[in-house]
Amino acid sequence: MANMMDYLDWRGDLTFAQAPFNEVDNLLLTELVYVDFTGIVPALSYDAANQEAVFLKTASRLFWEQHTEDEILGHISMTKMAPFVMKRMAQTKRFANVCLSSYVKDISVEQQSQFCALCITLDDNSLFVSYSGTDSTIIGWRENFNMAYLQKTPGQEKAVQYLEYAVRPMHHTIRVGGHSKGGNLAVYAAVSCSPGVRAKIKQVYSNDGPGFDEDVLHLEAYEEILPRLKRVLPQKAIVGMLLNHNAQYEVVHSSENHAKQHDMLSWQVLGASMVYEDKLSEQSIAIDGILKTWIAAMDLPKRRHFIETVFSILEHAGVESVDDFYHLKWKNVSDILRSQRELSEEDREILSSTWKGLIGAGNETLKKTWQDKKHSIKQN
């Protein structure tokens, strides 16, 4: 089976002038933003006449002068392979001389926000604005959960501001995209930006990105963007099914299983296209039903209280990243257990009732699925 790395072998010798932008290019450019370009790619400039850029081949060289392969492979994050993707991109005619600019990496504990974005100018002078999904920080994961009770997150607001400043008068063709939370940010920015910027957007890519509060789906600008929105999910999608969607989706074949299908490097491609399946797996549909039933049973204050309680426990135990989970020591575990015991009676009740609600939602969804199957068998 082939993935985006194989695509670089097939199409890497063709410039964008020779072979127009396609959906696999979108995967590569939304993977690229997961590379930490701090100190390598120029930051976003608010002066329209003074925007510096660096070639991808130069950025790759500088990155690997500062990091070793063993260091990168030692990380736990699902996106740790992004620098290796970049390295291969830098060796191709298609991507070596694309220009990287306006890099932003903003992690705010106070705002509970993890925001990262990158501008990529192709050799056909089109602009791709790439938004990062959740990194390995707990702050990034908390922002994902905050979407369950906030109408808009700080990250979504930053995504809109970034798009407004990043698009310059010379940019006539714009594509916006992201993976995971980055897909959500890409859609939100396209919907919420000024009409002048929105008119320049040719395509929006949400690669297994979560949805929105219902209010967003009823906006006139959201309806305007829908025909230009490409939403892709793997067969056993979980993240991309969260919250609310109106957009149609296509199901890409993944070589991995379960949660690992979220990794775009597992998504199969053939030529300039992804390899698609007919439908989502029954497992994905069942999990989506369970989560939606669970969340719907909680009002917004309860959702907020539950999320704040869980993350306060993690904070107290000194867990700041996914790597910290992997390297948990007994002291951290004991801190977590002690934090639970020290919770107020109200907080303990919130945790207990919420977890019971999840179990109840699971039982209800599985029962309905079984009844639907029995009904279908009888009809046939």
Image: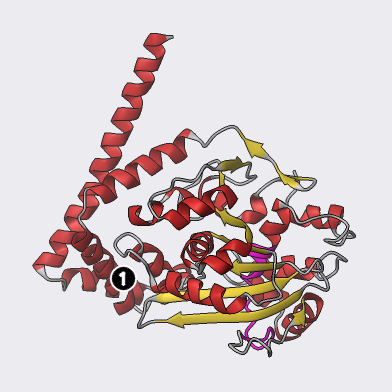
Give the camera-side residue of 171 and 235.
171
Residue in the image at 52% along x and 42% along y: 248
Quadrant for the N terminus in the image: top right
Left of 271 or right of it: where is 48? Answer: left
Question: Which image quadrant is residue 365 in?
Answer: top left
Q: Is residue 72 above or below residue 146?
A: below
Give the camera-side residue of 169 and 316.
169
Left of 124 or right of it: where is 201? Answer: left
Residue in the image at 65% along x and 88% along y: 39
- At label 1, the amino acid type is Phe
Q: Position of residue 376 (x, y in %)?
A: 40, 16
- Classify mark 1: helix, strand or loop: helix
Q: Position of residue 266 (x, y in %)?
A: 65, 51
Q: Position of residue 236 (x, y in %)?
A: 51, 42
Magenta region: 29-43
Q: Is residue 102 above or below residue 242?
A: below
